[in-house]
Amino acid sequence: MPTLGEAARAVLLTSDPHDKRRAARSLARAWRQDRLDHRCDTAMPDQPAWPTEPELLEPSRMPRRGKGGSERGRIALLHALAHIEFVAIDLAVDLIGRFGDEFPRQFVDDWIGVVADEAMHFALLDRRLRAFGSHYGALPAHAGLWEAAQVTADDVLARLAIVPMVLEARGLDVTPPTIARFQGAGDAPSAQILSRIYKDEIRHVRVGTAWFGWMCDERGFNAVETWHALVKARFRGALKAPFNDSARHDAGLTQEYYSVIAS
């Protein structure tokens, strides 16, 4: 029987976006059908395989997208979101393949669900781009999204602290106003896609926060104090208001985590 680690590595080494999406869904299906051994002793690549397009640029070189009022602006915003979801597939798969042995089966169950969600989110956004006559890869994209995986490859607590509890939590803050901009522009289909993603991301942050707390308990750490220390040490950016306190609370990420160290 193939192992979970082997299957995860295969997804990470798939470069074509649509093949990666299908491979991620196949990984989820194989796990749910008990066709993978719960072993993660296969080395994960330092860098996933990605397509030659989109061109990846440093943040300072990224063209300004505007606020999504024009069709061109909405295409640029949808493309940026599609890239986030594409990289999120690899982030979730790498988490499982790299750290799955440190947790009970339920951890993998939960994160396999995240993998499937991210693959579906990417498909929805790419389909919407095609409805506009565009596609994923047609525009430049942010080069730094994988950095969070690279700086937390040695410690699952650091990975959980930064990826779901900082980066995905930030999505909870910025997505509702983005949905409102699409609605204001009369783009109901795009707004509906983002509303679906928003609801799923609350669950993703909840999963990350819960397993962060579980591992802190296993190691005898105070969860809030440990999170503060890891964010200060491993996250290069700043936690900036405004925060979506309601959605964060629903995800288990209470204000005691982020209000103390927010800039």
Image (cartoon, rainbow, N blue to C red):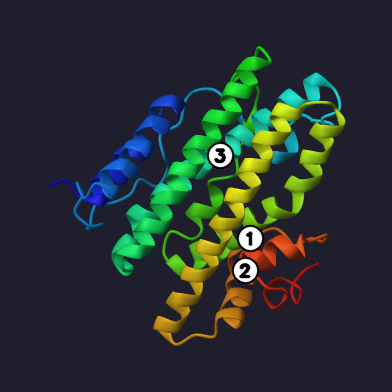
- Under mark 2, the amino acid is Val
Quadrant of the image occupied by residue 84: top right
Separation of marks 2 and 3 at Cα, in angstroms? 22 Å
Identify whether 165 is placed above or below 186. Answer: below
Indicate the position of residue 117 as horizontal and vertical percent values: 49, 43
Q: Which residue is outermost to the top?
A: 133
**SS at mark 1?**
helix
Indicate the position of residue 50 as horizontal and vertical percent values: 45, 31
Indicate the position of residue 231 as horizontal and vertical percent values: 62, 68
Query: Who's the residue at 44% across and 25% down the image?
Result: 18
Separation of marks 1 and 3 at Cα, in angstroms? 16 Å
Residue at the disc numbered 2: 231
Q: Earlier in the sequence, mark 2 or mark 3?
A: 3
The reply to whether discs 2 and 1 touch (Cβ–Cβ < 8 Å) is: yes
Tag on residue 85? 3
- Under mark 3, the amino acid is Glu
Q: Earlier in the sequence, mark 1 or mark 3?
A: 3
Q: Is residue 58 visible?
A: no
Residue nearest the viewer, comparing 144 with 114: 114
Q: Earlier in the sequence, mark 2 or mark 1?
A: 1
The reply to whether discs 1 and 3 touch (Cβ–Cβ < 8 Å) is: no
Query: Is 129 on the left or on the right of 207, as rendered?
Result: right
Tag on residue 39? none
Quadrant of the image occupied by residue 20: top left
